[in-house]
Image (cartoon, grey):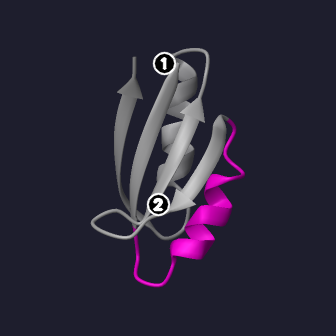
Amino acid sequence: MVAFILIVSELAKERGVLEGLLKVPGVVEARLLFGEYDALARVEVDDVAELDRAVTAIRNIKGVVKTLTLISS
């Protein structure tokens, strides 16, 4: 299962959020963005339970304000 998670961070916390994303199990790529969202994480997991754990871990990263999860087919 592949999902893309868009992240809004607190002002000037983008780099710290990016570092935190790369430590989350299942995150295979993370990039900073310009625009409405500040970062993008590509997550590859085996099932929805693992995706839930990854999303929860991302939401708990210091500086993360909001996430939007897009599951790829």
| SS label for mark 1 | helix
Question: Which residue is at 63% across, 41% downward?
Answer: 27
The reply, left or right, for residue 43 in relation to residue 9 is right
Give the secondary structure at mark 2: strand
**Residue 25 x/y as whole percent:** 69, 38
Question: What residue sits right under mark 1 in the picture?
Answer: 48
From the viewer's perspective, is residue 9 above or below residue 31? below
| The quarter of the displayed image where residue 15 is located | bottom right
Number of numbered markers: 2
Residue 35 point in image, percent of width and height: 31, 69
Mark 2 burial class by Cα count in 10 Å: few <14, some 14-19, many 20+: many
- Could you tell me if the residues under marks 2 and 1 are in contact, i.e. CB atoms within 8 Å? no
Marked residue nearer the N-terminal end (2 or 1): 2
Q: Disc number at residue 72?
A: none
Per the rendering, the mark at residue 39 is 2
User: What are the residue bounds of the magenta stretch?
Assistant: 9-25
Q: Residues within 10 Å of mark 1 (few under 14, many from 20)?
A: few
Question: Which residue is rendered at x = 65% and y = 34% of the image?
Answer: 26
Given the image, on which type of amino acid does mark 2 rest? Answer: Ala
Q: Nearer the viewer, mark 2 or mark 1?
A: 2
- What amino acid is at disc 1? Val
